[in-house]
Image (cartoon, grey):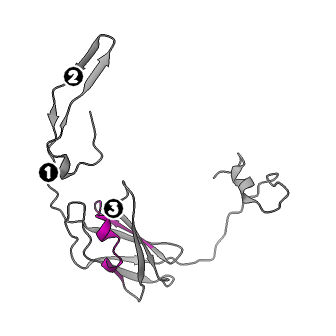
């Protein structure tokens, strides 16, 4: 079998064949023509997830997005006075995810992300004012795991590269 990770409308009508070579020679299969069905489905907003930094938001859509519209800051609004200053689309195969840089999100607050004008690779536009609710992180009292590694210092007293390079480091 042969798998294409992604076939677009420009691939429609492409012909593929297989050449098999062995000790007795080679054989070529008959050609197979690829048919690509049109994408008429608009992308949808799947989720929005805050980060522990209180200044970014990971947004997931149902399908790969057009970079120009996905990275247009004006296409994103967040409730509660939070503003969006940057939008970065992930690289293939994560081009259905956008990381938004935001103003500081209040701790433990619930927000609504509203998205408009974002298109998929086929040019279909998300429904206007699509929304996803998300909650920012909350700092809680708890414990922290501290691991000490002996004999990894080069007597500089503070070079973390020595720790990271040590075979015992779980990195």
Residue nearest the observer in this picture, 13 or 131: 13
In this picture, residue 36 sits left or right of residue 86: left
Residue nearest the observer in this picture, 19 or 76: 19
Tell me the mark number nearer the camera, choosing from 1 and 2: 2
Residue nearest the observer in this picture, 75 or 52: 75
Residue located beneath label 3 in the image: 96
x%, y% of residue 158?
Answer: 78, 63
Near mark 1 (Cα within 10 A), the count class, few <14, some 14-19 or many ≥20, is few
Tell me the mark number nearer the camera, choosing from 3 and 2: 2
Secondary structure state at the residue bearing disc 1: loop
Is the C-beta separation of discs 3 and 1 under 8 Å?
A: no
Disc number at residue 106?
A: none
Cα distance in 3D space between marks 3 and 2: 38 Å
Residue located beneath label 2 in the image: 28
x%, y% of residue 130?
Answer: 26, 76
| Outermost top residue | 24
x%, y% of residue 18?
Answer: 24, 28
Residue 170 counted in the magenta span? no
Residue 61 counted in the magenta span? yes
User: Where does the magenta region start and end?
Assistant: 57-78
Residue 154 against residue 22 in the figure, above or below: below
Secondary structure state at the residue bearing disc 3: loop
Is the C-beta separation of discs 1 and 2 under 8 Å?
A: no
* Residue found at x 19% / y 24%: 29
Residue 13 against residue 128 in the figure, above or below: above
């Amino acid at each position: 079998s042969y798998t294409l990770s992604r076939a677009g409308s420009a691939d429609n009508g492409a012909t593929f064949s297989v050449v098999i070579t062995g000790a007795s020679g080679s054989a070529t299969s008959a050609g197979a023509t690829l048919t690509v069905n049109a994408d008429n489905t608009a992308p949808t907003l799947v989720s929005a997830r805050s980060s522990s930094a209180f200044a970014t938001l990971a947004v997931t859509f149902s399908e790969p997005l057009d970079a120009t519209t996905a990275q247009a800051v004006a296409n994103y609004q967040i409730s509660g006075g939070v503003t969006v200053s940057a939008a970065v689309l992930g690289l293939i195969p994560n081009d259905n995810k956008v990381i938004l840089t935001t103003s500081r999100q209040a701790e433990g607050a619930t927000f609504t992300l509203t998205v408009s004008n974002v298109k998929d690779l086929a040019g279909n536009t998300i429904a206007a004012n699509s929304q996803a609710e998300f909650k920012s992180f909350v700092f809680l009292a708890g414990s922290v795991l501290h691991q000490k590694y002996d004999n990894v210092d080069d007597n500089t007293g503070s070079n973390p590269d020595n720790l990271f390079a040590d075979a015992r480091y779980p990195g």
